[in-house]
Image: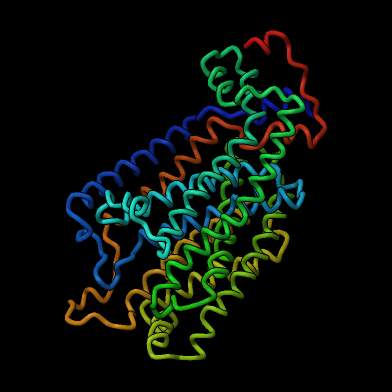
């Protein structure tokens, strides 16, 4: 059994090495390129994008739905598994919380990017009407962001105090850790409030997380379009979000395990369990996919039939079937075998699932817009198709890079795996604080 000092040394944040600095520089370059592209869009208008009167929602909204989906991982691992008393998930809770916070921040930003007049976002707060699903979305996104940040921050308090003492010779760093720890000293009263707060937030975030995905689904379902006119959209979105979130956690836990040398803490057992969880979630999601496409295919109304024909056999068929078969069916089959739930194979599968999840959102958003119930008369033929421009792609890559930069910076300054919780679960006793520790 390791001592508390050894545990702290293992789990304390690590400085960036050469590859880490190159990675941060790469993300910053992509973000700067995206900022330039957005400047062009803001000054010249949305006319420089591929969006027109038909495809009035394009790659930006696909990206928004993806960010909202992957943010559900915060409630999946952190809240649901924590409330159910699953101890093996402890090394994964903070990874999930970090992904959730990064994703929901960039999701909110993506909505602003999609607006031709971003200054009018204020009108949603000053003149918004509760009858509008868009206002519902603003409310649940804001609430979910606040709870997600608190659910990341509160469990950090003991760890920040541990880091304050660890870095007491680095006064500036120690000072900041001390400030953010809110004078945590681990007394009975603090522990009682600490546990109550985390339990309360874990309970609160579940309905809010389900709410944000349901409301996002309603943004589509309440718009009378073939492909969106469905009462299945709420659970369909939630099931898909669980899949995307689980894939995101698997991908990040593998990378952090390698870069931060955490094999003793994120073990093959954790990958095996996450692999089993992922295959279950994929099977549930495939069930909702069958519901989503079988019912309109059975009814075959004219517009729904045209939309499904485009997906199954038309211009979108290659992407559609690739996402379903490569992004969902094949991973589900592979994960039934134990050797595919080992770290490297599971990482590759998780990455494929995440990429497939992004393209699935693109399929949900774009083809539907090109088949309205009431076609617009007298528009150019090019408006009947949607191809994102290079600027749209660059801005989208910039938002993805922004989410990854948030994750990168957070894992640089906070422990990836909870030190305090890990020590308690393994009965590792923290040394008594000295007088000098108390004074500092």
Q: Is residue 2 visible?
A: yes
Question: Number of numbered discs present?
Answer: 0
Q: Is residue 348 visible?
A: no
Relative vertical location of residue 131 with respect to residue 125 in this rendering, above or below: below
Q: Is the C terminus in the top left, top right, bottom left or bottom right quadrant?
A: top right
From the top left corner, tell me how far across and down residue 396 is, in percent: 36, 53
Relative vertical location of residue 108 with respect to residue 226 in this rendering, above or below: above
Type of colouring: rainbow
- Residue at horizontal 58 percent and vertical 29 percent from the top: 13
Question: Is 33 left or right of 280, judged from the image as shown?
Answer: left
Question: Is 250 left or right of 220, judged from the image as shown?
Answer: right
Asked which quadrant contains residue 427, the reply is top right
Q: In front: 119, or 252?
A: 119
Q: In front: 44, or 319?
A: 44
From the top left corner, tell me how far across and down residue 368 is, in percent: 38, 75
Q: In front: 36, or 136?
A: 136
Relative vertical location of residue 162 with respect to residue 32 in this rendering, above or below: above
- Residue at horizontal 63 percent and vertical 45 percent from the top: 201
Q: Is the N terminus in the top left, top right, bottom left or bottom right quadrant?
A: top right
- Residue at horizontal 37 percent and vertical 54 percent from the top: 111
- Residue at horizontal 47 percent and vertical 49 percent from the top: 142
Relative vertical location of residue 217 with respect to residue 87 in this rendering, above or below: below
From the top left corner, tell me how far across and down residue 119 is, in percent: 27, 48
């Amino acid at each position: 059994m390791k001592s508390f000092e050894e545990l702290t040394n293992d789990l304390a944040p690590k400085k960036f090495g050469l590859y880490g600095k190159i990675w941060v520089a790469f993300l910053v370059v992509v973000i700067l390129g995206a900022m330039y592209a957005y400047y062009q869009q803001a000054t010249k208008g949305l006319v420089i994008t591929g969006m027109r009167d038909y495809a009035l929602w394009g790659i930006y909204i696909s990206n928004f739905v993806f960010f909202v989906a992957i943010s559900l991982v915060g409630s999946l691992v952190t809240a649901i598994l924590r409330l159910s008393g699953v101890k093996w998930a402890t090394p994964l809770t903070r990874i999930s919380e970090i992904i959730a916070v990064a994703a929901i921040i960039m999701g909110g930003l993506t909505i602003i990017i999609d607006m031709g007049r971003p200054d009018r976002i204020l009108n949603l707060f000053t003149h918004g009407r509760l009858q509008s699903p868009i206002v519902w979305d603003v409310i649940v996104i804001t609430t979910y962001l606040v709870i997600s940040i608190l659910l990341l921050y509160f469990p950090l308090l003991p760890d920040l105090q541990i880091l304050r003492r660890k870095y007491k010779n680095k006064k500036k760093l120690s000072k900041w850790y001390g400030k953010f720890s809110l004078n945590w000293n681990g007394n009975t009263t603090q522990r009682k409030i600490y546990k109550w707060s985390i339990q309360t937030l874990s309970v609160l975030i579940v309905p809010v997380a389900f709410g944000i995905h349901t409301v996002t689904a309603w943004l589509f379902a309440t718009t009378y379009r073939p492909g969106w006119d469905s009462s299945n959209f709420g659970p369909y979105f939630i099931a898909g979000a669980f899949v995307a979130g689980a894939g995101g956690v698997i991908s990040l836990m593998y990378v952090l395990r390698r870069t931060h040398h955490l094999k003793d803490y994120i073990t093959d057992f954790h990958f095996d369990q996450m692999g089993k969880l992922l295959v279950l979630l994929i099977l549930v999601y495939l069930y909702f996919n069958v519901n989503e496409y079988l019912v309109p295919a059975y009814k075959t109304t004219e517009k729904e039939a045209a939309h499904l024909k485009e997906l199954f056999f038309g211009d979108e068929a290659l992407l559609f079937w690739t996402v379903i078969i490569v992004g969902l069916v094949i991973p589900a089959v592979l994960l039934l075998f134990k050797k595919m739930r080992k770290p490297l194979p599971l990482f590759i599968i998780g990455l494929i699932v995440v990429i497939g999840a992004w393209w699935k959102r693109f399929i949900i958003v774009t083809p539907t817009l090109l088949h309205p119930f009431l076609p617009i008369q007298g528009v150019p033929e090019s408006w009947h198709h949607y191809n994102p421009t290079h600027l749209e792609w660059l801005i989208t890559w910039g938002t993805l890079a922004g989410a990854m930069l948030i994750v990168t910076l957070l894992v640089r300054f906070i422990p990836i795996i909870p030190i305090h919780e890990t020590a308690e679960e393994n009965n590792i006793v923290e040394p008594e604080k000295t007088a000098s520790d108390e004074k500092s």
